[in-house]
Image (cartoon, helix red, strand yellow):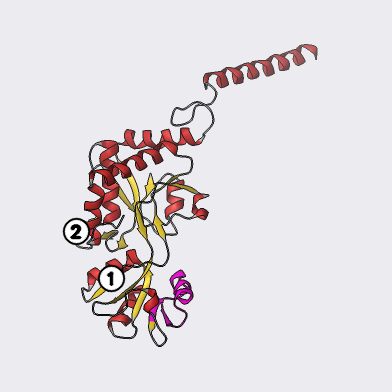
């Protein structure tokens, strides 16, 4: 019995020694990105940037159905827009070639999960920076300042939400924040809600209302489809768009922010803005 017990104790000691050796070999627990210590924000950032460079491709989540920002041409299969050009600029900055990019379609529902599970490196998809979303992802600086506005006929006297008087009809989508905001901003106007913005735009063209309201990023796309309409310059809410990056990814956030600053200083940003929006940014 004593001999058997001694063998058991010796075996346990060997296991403990091997475990200690393994831990020492890990150098305090290197992360996937090669940084020392636990998976802190810094190591997460280094890992993401390293992954892009190792893959030699920037994988980004974009919209496929939003005119001017990210729209897939059913004939060619190409996706084009403001967001796409920003993504290409990042690829060029990081990899030296704007074509080293892979676009993956995201929706408002799928984009954050796809970022978190590693399917994409970043989200560039008209994503408004909010305090709630900051709990799940990090954001770059604002790359496009959107806001709720109005779409009206070119010869309409309406130039501001203040011009919406009693008896006027404003069209929007059912259950949208746009409907809530317009009721607060123009309480005397009648608000008509449709199933979606496509139906609301059809109704506006048919003369069923005086204006259509939603985020001006969407309205710009509608105005481009039909030159008989224009977007009023005033916005009465703020919708700052940011590039979403994995939480704690400080290094990649800095890379993106440095690029955005550089683009605004050298005029490249203004060119992209004017190309898609049709005018130079106001600030």
Can you name the residue that lies furthest to the right here?
Answer: 1
From which residue to which does the magenta span run?
170-196
Camera-side residue of 180 and 64:
180
Callout 1: few (<14), some (14-19), or many (20+) C-alpha neighbours within 10 Å? many
Badge 2 or badge 1: first in the primary sequence = 2
Residues at marks 2 and 1, CA–CA distance in whole angstroms: 21 Å
Lateral position of residue 143 relative to residue 191, left or right:
left
Q: Position of residue 283 (x, y in %)?
A: 31, 54
Q: Secondary structure at mark 1?
A: helix
Can you name the residue that lies furthest to the bottom here?
Answer: 167
Total tally of numbered discs in the picture: 2
Is residue 187 among the parts visible in the rendering?
yes
Is residue 196 among the parts visible in the rendering?
no
Q: Position of residue 220 (x, y in %)?
A: 28, 66
Q: Which residue is mark 1?
A: 222
Camera-side residue of 143 and 47:
143
Residue 171 drawn in magenta: yes
Q: Which residue is mark 2?
A: 76
Give the image quarter of residue 121.
top left
Callout 2: few (<14), some (14-19), or many (20+) C-alpha neighbours within 10 Å? few
Q: Position of residue 5 (x, y in %)?
A: 77, 16
- In front: mark 2 or mark 1? 1
Residue 262 drawn in magenta: no
Q: Find out whether the residues at labels 2 and 1 contact each other: C-beta distance under 8 Å.
A: no
Q: Residue at x 35, y 73 (%)?
A: 160
Question: In the rendered view of the protein, which quadrant contains the N terminus?
Answer: top right
Q: Position of residue 218 (x, y in %)?
A: 33, 66
Q: Residue at x 35, y 76 (%)?
A: 212
Q: Residue at x 41, y 60 (%)?
A: 239
């Amino acid at each position: 019995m004593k001999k058997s017990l001694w063998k058991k104790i010796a075996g346990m000691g060997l296991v403990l020694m091997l475990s200690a050796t393994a831990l020492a070999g890990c150098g305090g627990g290197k992360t996937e990105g090669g940084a020392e210590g636990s998976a802190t924000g810094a190591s997460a950032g280094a890992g993401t940037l390293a992954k892009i460079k190792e893959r030699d491709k920037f994988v980004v989540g974009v919209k496929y159905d939003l005119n001017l920002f990210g729209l897939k041409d059913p004939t060619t299969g190409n996706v084009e827009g403001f967001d796409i050009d920003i993504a290409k600029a990042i690829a060029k900055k990081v990899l030296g070639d704007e074509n080293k990019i892979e676009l993956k379609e995201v929706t408002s529902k799928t984009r954050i999960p796809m970022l978190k599970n590693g399917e994409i490196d970043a989200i560039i998809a008209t994503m408004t920076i909010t305090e709630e979303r900051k709990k799940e992802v990090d954001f770059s600086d604002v790359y496009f300042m959107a806001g709720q506005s109005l779409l009206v006929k070119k010869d309409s006297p309406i130039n501001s939400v203040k011009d919406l008087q009693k008896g006027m009809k404003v069209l929007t989508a059912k259950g949208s924040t746009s409907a809530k905001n317009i009721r607060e901003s123009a309480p005397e106007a009648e608000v008509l809600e449709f199933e979606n913005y496509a139906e609301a735009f059809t109704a506006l063209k048919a003369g069923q209302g005086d204006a259509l309201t939603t985020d001006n990023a969407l309205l710009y796309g509608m105005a481009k489809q039909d030159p008989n309409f224009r977007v009023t310059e005033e916005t009465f809410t703020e919708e700052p768009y940011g590039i979403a990056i994995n939480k704690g990814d400080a290094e990649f956030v800095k890379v993106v922010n440095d690029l955005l600053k550089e683009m605004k200083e050298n005029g490249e940003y203004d060119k992209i803005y004017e190309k898609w929006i049709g005018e130079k940014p106001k600030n």
